[in-house]
Amino acid sequence: MHTIVDARVIITCPGRNFVTLKITTKSGVYGLGDATLNGRELAVASYLTDHIVPCLLGRDARQIEDIWQFFYRGAYWRTGPVTMTAIAAVDVALWDIKAKNANMPLYDLLGGASRTGVMVYGHANGKDMDETIAQARHYKDMGYKAIRLQSGVPGLASTYGVSKDKLYYEPADSARPTENVWSTSKYMPTVPKLFAAAREALGWEVHLLHDVHHRLTPLEAGRLGKDLEPFRPFWLEDCTPAENQAGFRTIRQHTTTPLAVGEVFNSVWDAKQLIDEQLIDYIRTTIVHAGGISHVRRIAHLAELNNVRTGFHGATDLSPVCMGAALHFDLWVPNFGIQEYMRHTPETDAVFPHAYTFSDGYLHPGTAPGHGVDLDEALAAKYPYRAASLPVNRLEDGTLFNW
Ligand code: EZ4
Ligand code: CO
């Protein structure tokens, strides 16, 4: 009855690419897991189809932990974004099946609701400060309690995280990566100005956030954090690349602005020092890119011991399946902080019917058994895969900028 009889990878592109794993048991119950890794979708699809599915068939779907350990330890080549995204897809699909069999929403199975809703933040972005503030007002009017502010930088042709699209945006914009130009000296003064204007326009009640997208050195990040302190930001995100976790000590020495990191992490080992030494305030690992619920749960527990809260990545390139799973996790996890919520396009929402709803600044995962997100396969088949890559940055003198 619980034997896995089928596991299939479904790729669809309703505006952007999404990879989904569908696992079915002998009794006919199925579960879905997101396997989307922006710009590397086919690598994960191959990892699943060629290496995981053949080992999954015939196993007992109830043994989530053993299956997780088998694919993590058994691979020999541990961690890495492709591997951990593939393992996450299996894990989330199996939790979905377990919760459906228990006839419970996933959050009940995890330990029950710890709060009535999941506070989310939306993205206000504009080509200049005025446009960003206007967007932020719009979010506030929609009921958002927290808003991320990103603005174009005068003198730079384009800025990552700023686009024409509102409510959702897609940074992976062409098959061969677009090359953007970056200047730290042009960027740095714009952010405190943006925050000063935002406080003036929006008041002090709403939470304001900013994402640096790994573009600064630790010392520069410390300076930006200090410059933002008077405006009480909720957090400063990805202010420096985090491969060198000790770099965050420098930032901590210079600012009390809360720090959020981890959307590119794929395992607890990427964050261990940051969390152990309390060098960050929010951990942003996602269910889809960090091994699923079984592994992110471990990260969250380690974080809890060290006064670090969760603040999961929730951009448009994480499918509604990931969003659904994350919201169940968020409703349960004791040390919840905030959840990013970039909306999906109407085409994507139609392909992935879901139980979660937005109201007055909070998302709720709904009470449907499982994670509450489905996939309309017939509709999905109408949107074939399209290659798309994330952009690359160069400095003004052409240096390939590796942050
Ligand atoms: O750059 O999801 O906080 N959100 C972000 C996103 C990420 C993309 C990468 O695929 O930084 O816009
Ligand atoms: Co980010």
Image (tube, rainbow, N blue to C red):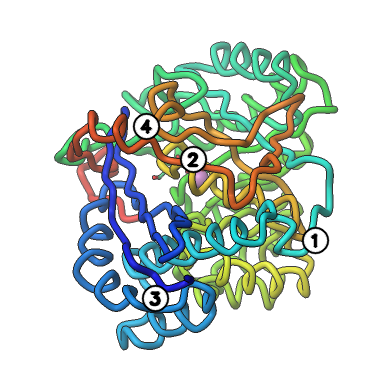
Residue matched to label 4:
170
Percent x, y of residue 171:
35, 35
| Pointer 4 local density, CA inside 10 Å: few below 14, some 14–19, many at least 20 | some
Give the farthest residue toward the left: 176
User: Residue 98 occupies which quadrant of the picture?
Assistant: bottom right
Mark nearest the camera among 1 and 2 is 2
| Cα distance between the residues tagged 3 and 4 | 26 Å
Residue matched to label 3:
79
Inspect the image, locate mark 3, and give the three-letter code of the amino acid beneath it.
Thr
- Tell me which numbered mark, 4 or 1, is placed earlier along the sequence: 4
Mark nearest the camera among 4 and 2 is 2
User: Residue 81 occupies which quadrant of the picture?
Assistant: bottom left
- Tell me which numbered mark, 3 or 1, is placed earlier along the sequence: 3
| Cα distance between the residues tagged 2 and 3 | 24 Å
Residue matched to label 1:
334
Inspect the image, locate mark 4, and give the three-letter code of the amino acid beneath it.
Glu
- With 52 as the anchor, is 42 left or right in this view? left
- Tell me which numbered mark, 3 or 4, is placed earlier along the sequence: 3
Q: Vertically, is 278 above or below 309?
A: below
| Pointer 1 local density, CA inside 10 Å: few below 14, some 14–19, many at least 20 | some
Label 1: which secondary element: loop
Percent x, y of residue 89:
42, 60
| Cα distance between the residues tagged 4 and 2 | 15 Å
The numbered mark at residue 320 is 2
